[in-house]
Amino acid sequence: DWTPASFIETTVTQLKEKIGNDKVVLGLSGGVDSTVAGVLLNRAIGDKLTCIFVDNGLLRKNEFEAVLDSYKGMGLNVIGVNAKDRFYKDLAGVTDPEQKRKIIGRDFIEVFDVEAHKIQDVKWLGQGTIYPDVIESVSVNGPSATIKSHHNVGGLPEKMNLKVVEPLNLLFKDEVRRVGKALGIKDELLGRHPFPGPGLGIRILSDVTAEKVRILQEADYIFINGLKEWGLYDDVWQAGVMLLPVQSVGVMGDERTYENVVALRAVMSTDGMTADWVHLPYEFLAKMSNEIINKVRGINRVVYDISSKPPATIEWE
Ligand code: XMP
């Protein structure tokens, strides 16, 4: 019978045998999968595991600091790398969504590679790949070339010449969460919504700038905290805000304004392949709209996305 405890016991033993005294490097993202993979590897090989957490400048507000703190609290050996400026520089003027994904993925690999090479004699790359990723990357690389390049760091092991260890690659998401709970990881971390690798970069339609990131982070912060305060966060599979490349006219006092529009998105899903928009209470939407417009300079209009997938995707890019 599969239980989290038996999985942990068997996997820790296997990891010890496989890795021996070698060193492992792992990229943490703040997400459930990489966190559980990190804690599991840490159980098996202790401080021979080094984790790297890259700030690509496209994370949620305060996320880098908060997540880095919680990782340190879990006893992981983590190096936090602030690489914001490099990403902003390379993204400047780029509007094509797939091009943005490629740049973000490439920059991540390069930043990670530089950090990883500071670790003497590292032999293995740990990854939080789970079973659905394994299936999906087969189809991404296969006949259907139109699927987005979700697996942004696919070229990492080849580039680094490392052996790959993926302790979660036979598990589904709910099993990963159960394993994480049995490892003592906080519910707050395990219950987090999925967040795309390219982050806010694909929620800023058109080109990305540091100022747009700041505006979007503020709006997103209000929305996500609102969901938590209203007890709605756990009823939603994923939520976020899209900054539209549209300005619209508004009034403020006696003045006309001409500022940005944001779209709120909240969906229910099991695996992200299909999704329904969530019928959030009108009172909640009204409150979010007021708060965002009053508090976030640069936004004067809020709309709610009522499209389901298919045909609309969860992200707008
Ligand atoms: P879509 O927008 O395709 O998203 O309906 C389905 C799920 O995948 C996430 N997503 C990504 N994740 N890199 C990622 O790591 C990406 O480029 C990417 N694009 C979309 C999206 O957030 C949703 O959970």
Image (cartoon, rainbow, N blue to C red):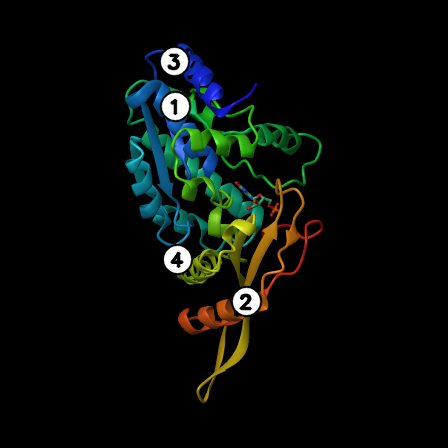
- Distance of label 4 from label 1 (alpha carbons): 35 Å
Q: Give the residue type at disc 3.
A: Lys
Which badge, 4 or 3, is on the more N-terminal residue?
Answer: 3
- In this view, the residue in front, 302 or 192, is 192
Pointer 4: what residue? 210
- Distance of label 2 from label 4 (alpha carbons): 27 Å
- Residue 24 visible somewhere in the drawing: no
Q: Where in the figure is residue 296, as x and y percent of width and height?
A: 42, 69
Q: Relative to 33, does residue 256 appear above or below in the rendering?
A: below
Q: Where in the figure is residue 204, as x and y percent of width and height?
A: 51, 57
The disc at residue 52 is none
In the image, is the residue at mark 1 within 8 Å of ligand 1 by its beta carbon?
no
Q: Relative to 58, does residue 9 appear above or below in the rendering?
A: above
Disc 4 to disc 1: CB gap under 8 Å: no
| Left or right, residue 132 beside residue 91 | right
Q: Where in the figure is residue 103, as x and y percent of width and height?
A: 48, 43
Pointer 2: what residue? 285
